[in-house]
Amino acid sequence: MRFPSPLVPARLIRRYKRFLADCVLEDGTEVTAHCPNPGSMMGLKDDGARIWLLPNTDPKKKLKYGWRLVELPGGHFAGIDAGLPNRLVKDALAQGRIPALIGYSETKPEQRYGSENSRIDFMLSDAGRPDAYVEVKNCHLRRDGDWAEFPDCVTERGAKHLRELTAIAEAGGRAVMLYVVQRTDCARFRLAPDLDPGYAMAFDTARDAGVEMVCHGTDITPEGIRLTGALPVDPSPQSR
């Protein structure tokens, strides 16, 4: 998925009010950019970080830039748009690039399901096989080695989704949790139980019930982002 226009480099001054970031462009101009991420963004919002912004020419929008990337050491990048993984997965499903989810003839996004008034990100259907319920989560936390970790803060909503998927699996359905790692310096995936022990417990319960835990990496450049191959998920219990 290519960005709709070339990104421009900047330095982060500060991120605040969750959705705003003050930045300075290379010519010294200070601008305020939209930050499309409500999470903590641990390790990705340091003052002075080199970031990449998407210019916005829509006259109806107040902010003329949207924050998209953080440049990391060693030529790596992290994507910070929390809504992008769903679009990446949608394209990859249509192109048959997620091996665990190949073979379904119909993909329906945002379908209501479960007992907690939830919407599943994708429901995959095909004649002669059970529907697959697929929930997508954005992951861009790295603290140790090449491990990607999730979540970067407490997420009761995420735990709720795991409970819903657990109920589907226990009823004999197919339930899949798909984590998308939006950074290029990770090679494997695990949870961060110290940041959200409740989510880790829900994860273990879900996996024990038969929920499939799948993770894919991304290739990220200032030109665009695409979903890449599967990353291994730590098989050990996560609520340690």
Image: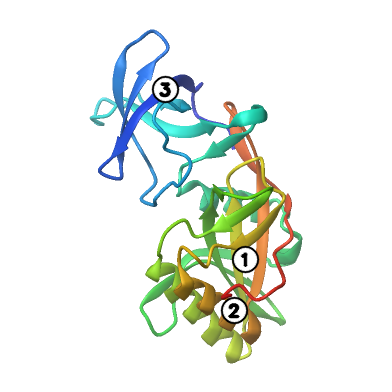
Q: Position of residue 62 (x, y in %)?
A: 23, 30
User: How far is the residue under mark 3 from the one under mark 2?
Assistant: 40 Å
Q: Secondary structure at mark 3?
A: strand
Identify which residue is drawn at 67% across, 64% down: 214
Q: Amino acid at mark 3?
A: Arg
Reading the chain from its start, which is encountered first: label 2 or label 1? 1
Q: Secondary structure at mark 2?
A: helix
Identify which residue is drawn at 63% across, 72% down: 125
Question: In this orientation, does residue 112 appear?
Answer: no
Q: Secondary structure at mark 1?
A: strand
Q: How many marks?
A: 3
Quarter of the image with the C terminus is bottom right
Q: Nearer the viewer, residue 76 or 8?
A: 76
Q: Position of residue 197 (x, y in %)?
A: 47, 72
| Pointer 3 residue | 11
Q: Amino acid at mark 2?
A: Asp
| Pointer 1 residue | 106
Q: Is 116 displayed left or right of 147 in the figure?
A: left
Q: Callout 2: few (<14), some (14-19), or many (20+) C-alpha neighbours within 10 Å? A: some
Q: Nearer the viewer, residue 225 or 5?
A: 225
- Write down the quadrant of residue 127 in the picture: bottom right
| Pointer 2 residue | 204
Question: In this orientation, does residue 32 appear?
Answer: yes
Q: Is 67 rendered above or below residue 120?
A: above
Identify which residue is drawn at 54% across, 62% down: 192
Q: Callout 3: few (<14), some (14-19), or many (20+) C-alpha neighbours within 10 Å? A: many
Q: Position of residue 42 (x, y in %)?
A: 45, 47
Q: Position of residue 95 (x, y in %)?
A: 70, 51
Q: Amino acid at mark 1?
A: Glu
Q: Is 190 displayed left or right of 25 in the figure?
A: right
User: How far is the residue under mark 3 from the one under mark 1?
Assistant: 43 Å
